[in-house]
Amino acid sequence: MWGETETVSCIACGDDVARQDAREYDKHGDRWDRDGKDFEYLCKPCFRSLSKHARDGLEAALEDAGAGEVDDEEFLSRFLTDTRGEPAGRE
Ligand SMILES: [Zn+2]
């Protein structure tokens, strides 16, 4: 261990999670070309819920939500609305 836990923010719910517990998500679909990339992360609950969607559906949903094009707040708001089909804030 490194003695210090690095945390990352889940792109779906915005929670801070330990990087080691997060699931890496590369919207470019190429995890092996890491140069100059900022990886995104999903916490386990979000990863599980997103995995219920077909991969193509997830990619499309992220694209539709403006991944990489709008700021995080706008992206999350769009993404949650698109994927859940109900207002944010309801568990
Ligand atoms: Zn999450």
Image: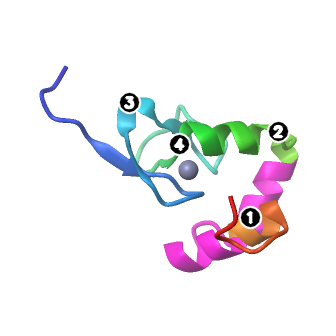
**Which of the labelled discs sits on residue 20, or is there none?**
3
**Is 60 within the magenta?**
yes
Precedes in sequence: disc 1 or disc 3: 3
Does the closest atom of ligand 1 sit within 8 Å of the Cβ of label 4? yes
Which secondary structure, mark 1? helix
Circle 1: residue type: Glu
Secondary structure beneath dot 3 equals helix
Q: Camera-side residue: 49 or 34?
A: 49
Pair 4/1: label in front:
4
Residue 63, disc: 1
Which of the labelled discs sits on residue 52, or is there none? 2
In the picture, measured across the screen, residue 51 lies left or right of residue 89, that is right
- Specify the principal SS of the magenta part: helix
How far apart, in angstroms, are the residues tagged by discs 2 and 3? 22 Å
Q: Which residue is mark 4?
A: 43
Give the quadrant of residue 79.
Answer: bottom right
